[in-house]
């Protein structure tokens, strides 16, 4: 999380301008102009279409229970995803409304990555799950016997990486 707001530079770091004040728990830019951020303290999604010069409040995710340690935010076109540690939320309307897509009972959602509206990966403490139907179902992709996952990155549907506390995995199908 960013506790002192968001700053941006347009001159290679010589000067920095405040783009957003306050705590930020998730940040994702889908292009040079369009970005989204999430603030846990007011459970709100904000959007910019001006490279962060102006941020517009979109929606409040009232079900968000908060675990800023693992908050990840991602958008592909009008679909977006956000986690709160034990649940994964999804929007299909650009962030105006959010629904719970996945709930984990005995582990935390550490990271996730969607490659399209249909294909995505979710890393929990010791497992990675894959969906090919937009999150209607998730199947176990792999499991580690020791430690926990920290971050995942997939180049495409068949090739990716997983970094854990005690492991670095190259995932291929």
Image (tube, rainbow, N blue to C red):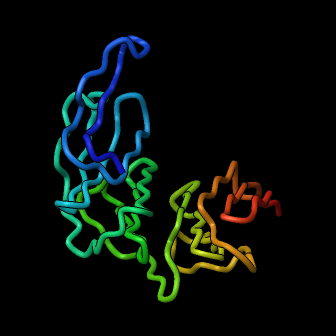
Residue 154 in the image, given as x and y percentages of width and height: 67, 53
Foreground: 148 or 20?
A: 148
Foreground pick, 135 / 164: 164
**Residue 60 seen anywhere in this rendered image of the structure:** yes
- Residue 129 lies left or right of residue 117; in this view the side is right
- Quick check: 137 left or right of 47? right
Q: How many marks?
A: 0
Determine the residue positioned at 25% across, 64% down. Answer: 97
Q: Quadrant of residue 89?
A: bottom left
Q: Residue furthest bottom?
A: 105
The answer to whether residue 30 is above or below residue 1 is above
- In the rendered view, would you say 110 is above or below 145? above
Residue at image x 62%, y 69%? 132
Query: Who's the residue at 65% across and 80% down the image?
Result: 139
Q: Is 137 above or below relative to 166?
A: below
Query: Where does residue 173 sit, x and y in percent of width and height?
Result: 83, 63
Residue most extreme to the right: 173
């Amino acid at each position: 999380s960013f506790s002192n707001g968001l700053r941006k530079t347009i001159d290679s770091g010589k000067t920095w301008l405040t783009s957003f004040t306050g705590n930020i728990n998730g940040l994702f830019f889908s292009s040079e102009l369009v970005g989204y951020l999430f603030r846990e303290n007011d459970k709100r999604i904000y959007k910019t279409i001006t490279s962060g010069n102006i941020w517009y409040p979109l929606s409040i995710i009232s079900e968000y229970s908060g675990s800023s340690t693992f908050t990840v935010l991602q958008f592909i076109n009008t679909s977006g995803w956000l986690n709160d540690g034990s649940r994964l939320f999804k929007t299909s309307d650009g962030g105006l409304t959010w629904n719970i897509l996945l709930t984990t009972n005995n582990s935390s959602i550490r990271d996730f990555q969607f490659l399209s509206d249909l294909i995505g990966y979710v890393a929990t403490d010791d497992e990675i799950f894959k969906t090919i139907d937009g999150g209607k179902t998730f199947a176990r992709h792999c499991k580690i016997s020791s430690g926990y996952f920290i971050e995942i990155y997939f180049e495409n549907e068949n090739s990716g990486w997983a970094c854990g506390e005690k492991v670095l995995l190259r995932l291929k199908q």
